[in-house]
Every structure is written in C-alpha cells, then in structure tokens.
Image (spheres, helix red, strand yellow):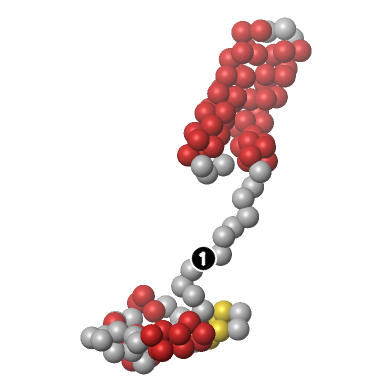
Amino acid sequence: MAIENKNRSYPIEYPYLENVEKIAQLFQTDIERGLTEEETQKKIEEYGLNSFKAQKQKKSLLILVDQFKSPIVVLLVVAATFSFLFEHWYRVFLFSGFFLLPQLWVFLWNYKRGDP
C-alpha cells in the first residue's frame, strides 16, 4: 500500500518493516554500488530531502505559564491563596514552595539547556 505525503507518493507504508532487498528493488537501487549523483538528484526531486522542517519556538514566558496548568499546581495555588486570606503564613510559604520552586527549577534548567 502506498502512502501519500502532500505531492509525493511512497511505494510502501512501513519501509522499516521490510527487508533491505525489497526496499532496494522498490526504489530501483543497487545495494552494492549505491546511488550515482544523477540518481540521487532524481530521488531528491521525486521524494524530497530527508530532513525535518524547523519548528517555531514558543516564547519563554508562554512556556513558563504552561507549566502552571497542571491540576495539582492549580490546587496548590488555590490552597496558598486561601492560606493567605486566612493569614496562615506558614502554609502560604509551604504551598507556594511546592508549586513555585519545582516549576521554576524545570523552566530554568530547560532554558539553560537551550530548550525553553
């Protein structure tokens, strides 16, 4: 079964499940000698480059805000807010530490790593 990808058609759907000889036969390739420069250009024109498109990076602030969307974190924020309203300062710092410190740690670690 062929798989369609935009304007290209690939001869088989799951090539990684087939043996090498069958793949070579489908793509009309000699396993021993490989592709010539001319054959390579034809394959690139027919199937496109073997590469990924760059993904748009999210803004750092949006990533930080996304980390606070967990239901557990929302529950801790609500608990900290109620503790603040009832002036239970120890619990305010306790709950705030449970949701702020880990989230900031992960964000800074990813940011430093270059993966915000």
Give the farthest residue toward the front.
37
Q: Crowding at label 1, few (<14), some or many (≥20) Cα neighbours within 10 Å?
A: few
Q: Residue at 23% x, 86% y: name it.
A: 32
Give the farthest residue toward the left.
32
Total tally of numbered discs in the picture = 1
Q: Nearer the viewer, residue 102 or 42?
A: 42
Q: Quadrant of the C terminus?
A: top right
Q: Residue at 67% x, 37% y: name it.
A: 61
Query: Is label 1 in a helix, a strand or a loop?
Result: loop
Q: Residue at 54% x, 32% y: name it.
A: 108
**Where 65 sits versus 27, above or below?**
above
Confirm whether residue 71 shows in the render. Answer: no
Left or right: where 51 falls relative to 62 = left
In which quadrant of the rendered view does residue 19 lie? Answer: bottom left
Confirm whether residue 52 shows in the render. Answer: yes
Q: Nearer the viewer, residue 25 or 34?
A: 34
Q: Would you name the residue on which mark 1 appears?
A: 52
Residue 49 horizontal/vertical position (percent): 49, 75
Q: Residue at 63% x, 25% y: name it.
A: 76
Amino acid type of disc 1? Phe
Residue 112 horizontal/vertical position (percent): 50, 35
Q: Nearer the viewer, residue 33 or 52?
A: 33
Residue 93 horizontal/vertical position (percent): 61, 13
Give the farthest residue toward the right.
85
